[in-house]
Amino acid sequence: MKVQMHTSLEPKRTSCARLTLQVVLIGVITLTLFSALFISYIGLPRSADLASTTAAHAWAKANPTGTRFAYMLYATTKISLCNAVIMAHNIRRLGTPPSIAIVILASVKLDSHPTSEWSAALDAANAVQVPVEPWTSSSLQGRSSVWWESLTKLRIFEERGYDKVVYLDADMWLHRNLDHLFMLKRNNDVNDDQHENPPRSHQATLDQPKATSTNVDSSMLWAPRAYYISPQPFFASTLMVFTPSNARFRQLYDAVTQSTRQDYFDMDVLNDVWDPVTFLPSHYVVLNSELLNSPSLVFEFANASDRIAHTYAHHFSALPNGTYGKPWEVDRPVGHKWRTKRKAAPLFYQLFDMYLDANDRLCPWLQPRDVGRHPPQDS
């Protein structure tokens, strides 16, 4: 009897064990699928070859295909934080829709609790601030904090859930919408000679590209030529279009940590490491100093006026007196009348007025010590 009872219960125990195992397996599969969908929804990186220093943040789909686009800026000081919000407002002013994110990577050393004015400025530009660890290098030791922590810029290449990023230096003034750069692919490219002197037909294609695929090549980077540096080829890091890659970031990190060079800046690192690179036409970013003395830089255009009209961004590199400097370092002259140089283009001084207007309007939370302004110097 005992044997019979034991025998009759065994199938029931086996059946219960199998049922329990099935329930557990279904639960594990359901949890895994839910986690994957949740990660996809909030935009977390799908790979983590290198730990990211950011918190996850929401993203909006930029088009029906679900491709995620973002403009990216960075800031390590309060004044560069102000510049970033000015740039964010200019991006929106020129027509970029909210479906394209604007992300400001801000050093964790900055105030973790921004003022209400700063928060309002961020909200008005529909931008998000993401904290990151600042990146310093012994090769830049002894320089101002702007340069000492300038390698923080390279954190833009870390994966944060975006398929294509357009990076902009914040110490520029943006004149024209750049959303078309998100559509750049290999079949939109031209060879190096054409980039140096692109025909009008190609320029029209670059302004309004026709995307045929959502696939992007993670090894590609587009950037304008640093035409003011010799020898060439050498690209500028003021504007870059790329697909973020933790593997690429690791290459940049290794290059910095293994280098024995002094004054090894972000642009030097990028030019040493990145290959291949496609050069954007040089008029995408032009130094504001080119406007100072009888503007003659025309690139492929008929004259200087035509070039100025087609420039996407002017990078501040010269003060009103012609010396190197940035617009936040100088105050307006009495009566708001600049002492002008006879051959300078009017836009040269207008850029300072536009920047200072934006600074006053969007950054009232700045203190004098954050800016370090001094009266405008005589020419």
Image (tube, rainbow, N blue to C red):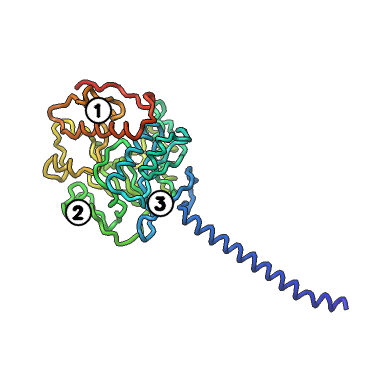
Answer left or right for 19 relative to 196. right
Look at the image and tell me whether residue 146 can be seen. no
Labels 1 and 3: the sequence-earlier one: 3
Asked if residue 327 is positioned above or below residue 310 in the image, the reply reads above
Residue pictured at 40% horizontal, 49% vertical: 244
Residue at the limit of the structure toward the right, as seen here? 1
**Amino acid residing under circle 3:** Tyr
Q: Please state, as top left, top right, bottom left or bottom right, where the N terminus lies in the image.
A: bottom right
Residue 266 x/y as whole percent = 36, 38
Residue pictured at 17% horizontal, 55% vertical: 201
Q: Pick whichever, 276 or 291, lies toward us.
A: 291
Give the SS element for disc 2. helix
Give the SS element for disc 3. loop
**In whole angstroms, how far apart are the C-alphas of marks 2 and 1?**
34 Å
Q: Pick whichever, 122 or 33, lies toward us.
A: 122
**In whole angstroms, how far apart are the C-alphas of marks 1 and 3?**
36 Å
**In whole angstroms, how far apart are the C-alphas of marks 2 and 3?**
27 Å
Residue pictured at 35% horizontal, 58% vertical: 63
Answer left or right for 167 relative to 307. right
Labels 2 and 1: the sequence-earlier one: 2
Asked if residue 15 is positioned above or below residue 308 in the image, the reply reads below
Q: Which mark is residue 162?
A: 3
- Mark 2 lies on residue: 204
Q: Pick whichever, 143 or 89, lies toward us.
A: 89
- Mark 1 lies on residue: 319
Task: Give the quarter of the image for residue 168.
Answer: top left
Disc 1 crowd, CA 10 A, few/some/many (<14, 14-19, 20+): many
Q: Which mark is residue 290?
A: none
Residue 281 x/y as whole percent = 22, 46
